[in-house]
Image (cartoon, rainbow, N blue to C red):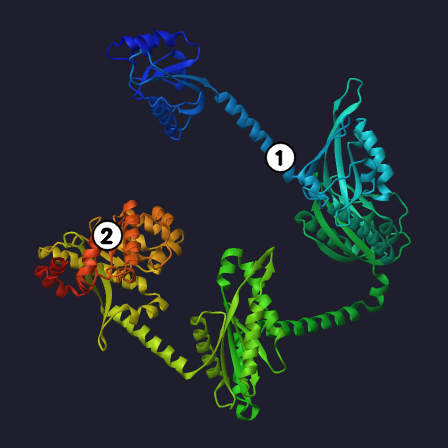
Amino acid sequence: MHPSTTEQASPKDPVRDDFNDLLAILPLASAVVGADGRILGCNDPFLELVGAVAGLGEMTFAGLLDGLERPTFQAIHVASLADAALPRSLEFAIGLDDTRRRHVIASIKPFRPTSNQALPYLLIQCTDIQPIRDSEASLVERERRWNHALVGSSSGVWDQRMDTGEMSYSDVWRSIRGLGPDDPIAGTTEEWLDMVHPDDRSRVLHSIERQNAGDPEYTTFEYRERHKKGHWIWIECRGACVEWDDEGQPVRIVGTDTDITERKAAEEALARMSRRLKLALDASGIGVFEADFSTGMCEWDSGMRAIYGLDTDPLIRINGEWEDMLHPDDAERVQTKVNRHVEQLIPFSDEYRVVLKDGSTHYIRSRTLPFIDGDGHRKMVGANWDITADLELRKELERAKTLAEARNRDLEQAKARIEHIALHDHLTDLPNRRYLDEMLESLDGEGRADKGGLAILHIDLDRFKQINDTLGHNAGDAMLRHVARILRDNVRGGDFVARIGGDEFVFVARFDGNQRMLTALAERLISELRKPVAYDGQDCRFGASIGIACDRTGTVAPRQLLLNADIALYNAKNSGRSRYAFFSRDSHSRMVDSKRIADDILRGLEQNEFLPFYQFQFDARTLDVSGAETLARWRHPEHGILTPDKFLAVAEDIGVVGEIDGLILERALADMTRWEKLGLSIPKISVNVSSRRLHDPSLKKKLSALDFDPGTVSFELLESIFLDDNDDQAIDNLRHLKKMGIDLEIDDFGTGHASIVSLLRLSPKTLKIDRELVQTVPGSRARRNLVGSIIDIGHSLGIRVVAEGVETPDHVRVLRGLGCDVLQGFGLAVPMPFEDTVTFLRDESWRSCALSA
């Protein structure tokens, strides 16, 4: 008996000894598993398979398996105890350590060693299939790499069997020709030849014949084939025979087709350019040369030799014929310039004189480009042309005149460009804010009472930021140019349109008192701007909100009209966006009121006027205080205590809701300490948290500065905010809240659109049933059933349920009967400041509801 197997059975067990004697003679890795799942015995191959060195001790078979495999085995084991039918073999993964697994095929057979054995044992025999799995994975990976390489190369693969006529083609092969997976392919050579360009057919047939014969000269050939859409494409065909029959005849040809249409077009374009360049050189009398300073030789074309009067070989020695012909007065300057520019690889041009063999002096103009070629040779390519005749007659005069005219043109163009740039938007080329201001100022100085009315439309794009954020600023720029085109298309004589920044535009129009005309214009612009715009294969959608201000009398200053249009735009966007609004005195008054409230809120934050009110929550069975909801109130110096419906919307607009939430939480934590010192036990407080605060990147840092015990604070989140408006930042903040011991509660449950999946994912501690569902519970069976279902769902997920809107003893009785955990409502406690809570808690007057119920 192997020593390792004896270590598994302690104390001495004759049944186990029998197992080990049996297992020792089995060739496969084998083990016996008892009814409790422990390994009663195993042989050496089994120990080697599982990587055990000193034995398995009291380990269970399930403990050897990978975590994902354990439930499957445990189900099989349970079935065996019930004498159920078992699978003959299963594949398991045995965990060798934290990172490695070994796959085995296990044969599982239940048996009873003795006739009076109550529960069967399992004989498990394992075969290591890990090498097979590794080989399969390696094969799949090699095939995947090969397929990726072919797809990445844009080459279509074809495979032809000569003996059976069978042909197979890859998806890329089909896509090159515009064919889909189900499109038919030519079945015969004659049908296929009809798709080949007539000029290429005989050559293609010869090339295929030689390719099949294994001729290396025809491994690759090119031809034209008709695309499915009707145009010709160039194909580069590469192929070779990979199988031959016993007589040496090709049996299987495999190859790739590549679309080289663009390359052919580029080659043709290069050939056309070369022909044109040659014609241009011949017509202009320009000579071209290339000098190689590594070899000391320079190659001249026929034009160069004609300019310098030489009939010799095109190869000219550097520091030879050309240098000898330089005019003595120019030679040093020219050669110094050449050497300097060649050394620094700087392109240059020059003019100099040369003395030809017949003694005549000629003026030469040159353009030269130094470079280093692929072999590392320092070279220079250039062009020369003889300007003697022109220079002798008009050199100085023409040069001076050309220079003066060029400078004058440059100055005029520069001036025009500067003026245009200063007054126009660089992206859309529309007038900018400065141009608009100057135009409005000029209108104000025209004596507009005599000029007629004026209308201003202030246009702001809706959902434009999403396009920038998702598709990038290039897409946003394209949309702005699209908007500019639409606005230009709607400009009449005398109208003016400008982009004043970002996604805002201003449309200035003459106005004769007909508001229907302005309405039609606004509706037309909104309709046009709402249409999708194609960009980079996608449809971009956005809209526009328009504020309109008009004055028929000419008595309102243009700048005031612009301000009025801006106010009207604000009202249009607040009304739902993608609409227009006319300026009115009432809307102006509302905006002034909103600004006054905003100023008061900011002052109130500075003066610490925001304070918490508390509405206590009670255990449904005992009516003991189980917590308190913290509610924000504003102690306004003129209007007294204000509830959030009076200030929350404005606070959202100016972005201070998060600051108010944080202030209320800090004061509530201070009040908990005060209750504790007075001997009053408030187990926990809950505070409402806005969407803005939930998305605040600095929320974790702010909360870390607060002092509270885990489990004493919970955050109430509106159902829609909690489940619909989250992003990565919000999810990260929610995780951090849980780590800090801050519980999550879903407020107003039943009025939004939370799902059970969302509850499972986010695991709130508590959900609060909205008071609208609770209100009619005593008198409505249907409402009782609904609320009871919500309570059951919450309890099934381990979530505590709070009922809001408890106002009568009947509410207490019914909700207690439905199993609700916590009650909250005006019938038990109204919201109150801290000063009133002490008397309320000590008197316990709410318990009268319990007696009534």
Q: Quadrant of the C terminus?
A: bottom left
Q: Residue 702, percent across and down?
A: 28, 55
The answer to whether any part of residue 160 appears in the image is yes
Q: Quadrant of residue 349?
A: bottom right
Task: Determine whether the residue tagged by mark 2 lies in a helix, strand or loop.
Answer: loop
At label 2, counting other C-alpha atoms closer than 10 Å, the crowd grade (few under 14, some 14-19, many 20 or more) is some
First-in-chain label (2 vs 1): 1
Q: What residue sits right under mark 2 in the picture?
A: 818
Judging depth in this view, the residue of 585 and 188 nearest the camera is 188
| CA distance separating discs 2 and 1 | 63 Å
Judging depth in this view, the residue of 495 and 304 nearest the camera is 495
Which residue is located at x 75 percent, y 48 percent? 266
The answer to whether any part of residue 696 appears in the image is no
Q: Residue 711, percent across and down?
A: 22, 49
For residue 831, side relative to residue 530 (left or right): left
At label 1, counting other C-alpha atoms closer than 10 Å, the crowd grade (few under 14, some 14-19, many 20 or more) is few
Q: Name above or below for residue 267 compared with residue 170.
A: below
Q: Name above or below for residue 706 compared with residue 207.
A: below
Judging depth in this view, the residue of 384 and 678 nearest the camera is 678
Q: Quadrant of residue 68?
A: top left
Amino acid marked by disc 2: Leu
Amino acid marked by disc 1: Asn
For residue 293, side relative to residue 653 (left or right): right
Which residue is located at x 49 percent, y 90 percent? 555
Q: Quadrant of the N terminus?
A: top left
Q: Residue 314, percent across and down?
A: 85, 44
Q: Name above or below for residue 597 compared with residue 291.
A: below
Judging depth in this view, the residue of 41 and 96 nearest the camera is 41
Q: What residue sits right under mark 1 in the picture?
A: 147
